[in-house]
Structure formats: structure tokens, C-alpha cells
Image (tube, rainbow, N blue to C red):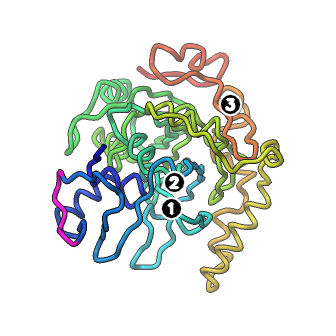
Amino acid sequence: MSEKLQKVLARAGLGSRREIETMIQAGRVSVNGTAAKLGNRLDSLSKNICIDGYTVKVAVPSEIMCRVLVYNKPEGELCTRSDPQGRRTVFDRLPRIKGARWVAVGRLDANTSGLMFFTTDGELANRLMHPNCQVQREYMVRVFGKVNEMIIKNLVCGVALEDGKARFEDVVYVGGKGMNHTFYVVITEGRNREVRRMWESQGVTVSRLKRIRYGNLYLNKELPRGGWVELELADVNYLRGLVKMLPELETIITSKTKNHKIHSQKIRRAVYKHAERIDTSEPHKYYSAYRGTQGEQTVAPSNLFQDKLGYGKLNHGQLVQGKRSGCVVNSTKNRLDKSSSGRSRIR
């Protein structure tokens, strides 16, 4: 059975389908010495496929184990494999693997922190990012400016952006002082700087943005900024099930490591050592971004909300699914009860 060339290359982790389509249009991809064209299909993986003159290996899907890492992205890192200016990227600290490579599931801009996934399955990454799959992303956002009920209503009903209409599925007010206010917002697509642009369309500036949930998997406060952990098979298959993919049958997580808790201090030391190696000129300045992680409320607004938000304890290789079922407006009555959670909704 033949498959489109861009689909095969995306599954191999060589880029998103859109990126590979751009490569094909630019004449950078060839098959058996002939320049590829959009719409070309592959009926055999034994053909010689080259990108920019370099041969690339494309494995049969069943030969690649689907692995997923969860990464706590700090502010300042770029979502790119390499940067001409030498700035730090989200790939710098990921573990090296043979026969595959990590593919980022979506992007966060340099000033946004929080939950990111990396997988060895390019098709899984593509489906999780595709707007048709309607996978929820939840962000904690702090804004500066006057926010009233009309602004919230506009954001929920939809606002016009340069690349089309966009809306939040849910907006929950946490609190604030003066002109600073904190909200939880839910969106089902990941266009470039979409959350920031939506607030800016209402004359409000986003001063901090952090992703805390993807689907029903939450970022845990035990995972330090700049740290990563691999998901267990059950959570990998949860993500695959979200986008209607067959379950994975293998995992590298063993029974010995399954019940081990994350050693936050150990991960934090590894983050510091890595930063010290790549930036010997100002290692302590870089480390300051990770110091005090335990003292700061980097994921939940306060310990009071930990159980309410579903930030359960994170075992080695596992993100515990949150206790709340979702953030659709009509299914969050208990979560939004101010008397029980301390938060209220603005409609």
C-alpha cells in the first residue's frame, strides 16, 4: 500500500508534514535521483530518499517503538533543533537515542514555559498537533490590563485574528491585584502565539504564560524546569487513543523503575551541570532560573489547589491523569465552585 511522501517522512521524524511539503516545493527532496513533487506516493521504503542531497533512512512504522517524553520547558529556550545564534533549545538536554529521533509535539514560544511532549512517532506528533483532533491544551496566563465580562465573553465566543477566528473553550478566573490578573484558559488548537494574540486583540497584555495540561495529562510540580521524564505505556497509549491510533505494545520502562518517584533534586542537579557545561562563562546566572523551583508555585497557583487541579504525584515514567474530567463549560461545575476550589468563572 502506497503512502504520501510527506506522511512517510513526517512519521520518520524529519519534520512536520507542512515543513516537509515546503521542502518538496523548494526542490530539496528527491526519490531515486528525481526531484519529488507534492502528491508523490511511495509504494516501497527501499527507494533512495534524499533531503538536501543526504540520504535519509525511513523505517517501517512497526519497527519504531513509540516513546514519549514529557518536558518542563523553562522560559528562554527555543523550540528548534539548532539556533544560528547559539541560544538554548528544548532539544539540548533530551536523551540521545539510536535509530530514531525526538519530534516535538507542537511548539511554545521563547517566553512561554510549561508542558511539552516529545515522541519518536512522527505520525503521533502530527495528529496531536492537528486542529481536527481537537485535543485540549490548558494554560495558566497572567495578564496586565483591565479585564471585564465583555472581554471574557468575546474570548469565549471567538475573536478575529489575522489567520482566522479563534476562541477559548473555557476561561477560569483565579485572582489578582490591581491591573494583574491570572486565568486558566483552554484551547483546542495550537496556532503561533494564539493565546497571546487573543488577549492582545482585547487590549490586554500577557505577562506570563505556562502550559499545564495536554489532553488529560498534567504537568507536575515535582518535575523541575528543564527536566524530562518518560511516560509509561498506559499514558503513551492514552495519547495514541486521543487521536485514534493503534496502541503501542512495547516500552523501555521496566518493573524496577515503574514505581520509582521522580528525584527532583537529582534532575535539578543534572540541569545545572548541563548548563554549566554549555555556558561556562555565566553558569550561576543560568542556574538561577532553576533555583527555588520547590519554593515557587510553578505549576499550580498554590498548594491549596493541588488536589482540585489533579496534580497528582508523578512516578518515574508516568504522568498521573488529573482528577477533573475536562474543561468544557458544561462539565466543570464542581471545579468552578468558588466555595470548594477558591476560583470563580467570569462569563
Disc 2 residue type? Thr
Q: Residues within 10 Å of mark 3 (few under 14, many from 20)?
A: some
Where is residue 235 shown, x and y percent of the image?
Answer: 62, 37
> Which residue corresponds to mark 1?
101
> Which residue corresponds to mark 3?
305
Of mark 1 and mark 3, the one earlier in the sequence is: 1
Where is residue 9 shown, x and y percent of the image?
Answer: 35, 57
Contact (Cβ within 8 Å) of mark 2 with mark 1: yes
**Secondary structure of the residue carrying numbered label 1:** loop
**Residue 232: quadrant of the picture:** top right
For the N terminus, the image quarter is top left
- Is residue 25 in the magenta section? no
Of mark 3 and mark 2, the one earlier in the sequence is: 2
Contact (Cβ within 8 Å) of mark 3 with mark 2: no
Disc 3 residue type? Phe
Q: Disc 2 to disc 1, how far (Cα)?
A: 6 Å
The reply to whether residue 148 is in sight is yes
Residue 250 is marked as none
**Secondary structure of the residue carrying numbered label 2:** loop
| Type of secondary structure dominating the magenta stretch | loop
Q: Disc 1 to disc 3, how far (Cα)?
A: 37 Å
For the C terminus, the image quarter is top left
> Is 346 situated left or right of 268 in this image?
left
Residue 120 is marked as 2
Where is residue 166 shown, x and y percent of the image?
Answer: 28, 34
Residue mark closest to the camera, 3 vs 2: 2
What's the magenta region? 33-39
